[in-house]
Image (cartoon, rainbow, N blue to C red):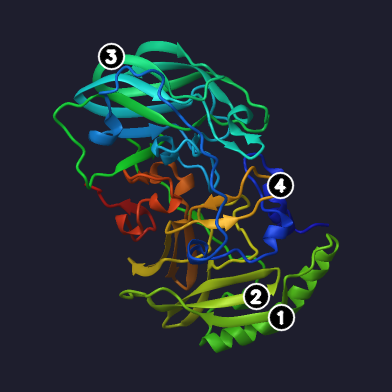
Amino acid sequence: MVSWWRLLLLLPLLVGGCSGKSKAAAEKPAPSALASVAGAPAVAAPVPVPVPTEGDAGSSLVDLLAVTPSRIAVSSAVRNPRDFPEHLIDGDPNTAWNSKTGDLVGATIAFRVPGDARVEAIEMTAGYVRVKDANDLFTMNHRIRRVEILRNGTSLKAVTLDVASRTMQRVAIGASGGDFQIVVKETAPGSKADWREVVVSELRVLGVPGKERRAPSDRLLVYVGGLDAAPPETTGTVLEIPRLPKELLGAHASLAAFCQAFERTIAPIAVAEIAEYAQWNDAAPVRTIACEEKALPPIGAVSAPWTGAKAVRLAWAYTDAVFVIGVTAEGMRLTPIRFEDRYGNGMGCGPVWTRDHVDRVRFENGWLVTTIDGRGPVIYGRSNDVSTASAYQRGAAICRMRAGELTCLEWNPQYLESFAYKVYTLSKGSDVAAIPWEREATFRVDETGAIARVPLR
């Protein structure tokens, strides 16, 4: 019988909408975020695809999203580590917004511009216009055949788009500013039957601005779920430490004491895992059990009940990762927060919280808080994907001690719609490293573990 954790590793290959790593890629240590930026093999440059504007009329119009204090939102976002809502407005046709799987007819793009502005037209692609090697993502994905345009909840018009055209298609509007919705009413399926997302490379809102202007420091946010999306009411997903003996999860007097217990108890587990994987002709990548202290980013002021934090690399059989250890007056306790995770992927699909590095460790309201904030891509080779993927790192994991019990939660903002405000910096180029998420400095953790946002303006 195949164990539950073996099935977890196979999950990316069984579930639609996710592209799993190949076995060869999974058996190689993934480069760290810093290594991928400085010295790791680069992702192949995207194939340039021109996206001309149809006709020359209206050349004096400007993109209102760029120059006015506007908002933009999409109805949903696909769950993968490559395609983000901000790709809708990044000026790069080789990227695209993808709705969540199944959000086809009824999917929406909404935008809000000041009332004294004049919206003359919108321009958008009918699909994902990129061609990568032998893969034509325009014909492989759904394309939008028909949309309805609404202003302040009232229908303005229904428009048919040319699903054979890769250009920006212009839809005349001729209305004053307000809240607009582009509602997908019909799509043309692509050649990949299991790709069931609305995909749009680019959107522009052309018009004449009024008196209001976007300040240079004012960032254009792409909301998921609605223009007035509220912070989520729920806390993060509970994290658990897999496949470790219970005696390792209690308090230890020192790191040396923990490592002694680890090396003693993990040996039979490693033997069992290697035997289980042998039936799949897998060779264990870790031949020597390891327990060694590693470095953490600088830690700020410590608050009770914590007295500090450490990191320890644990390696055996098919696991090689650095775990965060919380330190209290009662001793050291292993947490499920891990990074530099070479062979594991605890979320099945390639997540935004990739655990390849930790940017900051801090303490707040009794919680130990770790964050990764999108400082660079991680390169993953994928055998069943159209290209090598660049994965963002962004997220937070928090732990607290109460009555001798350790509780840890994971916040993955890509999957929490109203927390997933994507930040688009108004700059040229399409370098993914130039598109940060809401930096960890913009949220606070309260006593209950809920995330409280700090106003941006």
Element class at badge 3:
strand
Q: Which of marks 4 and 2 is nearer the N terminus?
A: 4
Write the residue at 44% across / 24% down: 168
Kindly check if marks 4 and 2 are in contact, taking CB atoms under 8 A apart as contact: no
In the displayed structure, 76 sits above or below 268; it is: above
- In which quadrant of the rendered view does residue 299 lie? bottom left
Q: In this view, does 309 lie to the left or right of 335?
A: left
Residue 29: give x, y in percent of width and height: 63, 66
Dot 4 corresponds to which residue? 13
**Kind of residue indicated by mark 2:** Ala
| Label 2 with label 1: CB-CB less than 8 Å | yes
Residue designated by label 2: 315
**Could you tell which of marks 2 and 3 lies nearer the N-terminus?**
3
Dot 2 lies on which element? strand
| Residue on which disc 3 sits | 174
Q: How far apart are marks 3 and 1 (CA)?
A: 69 Å
Question: Where in the figure is residue 319, as x and y percent of width and height?
Answer: 66, 69
Alpha carbon of mark 3 to alpha carbon of mark 4: how far? 48 Å
- The numbered dot on residue 344 is none
| Of residues 78 and 327, the one drawn nearer to the viewer in this rendering | 78
Considering only order in the chain, which callout, 1 or 4, is on the residue closer to the N terminus?
4
Q: Distance between the residues labelled 4 and 1?
A: 29 Å
Query: Which disc number belongs to residue 288?
Result: 1
Mark closest to the chain's N terminus, 2 or 1: 1
> Residue at the spot x=33%, y=19% of the render?
121
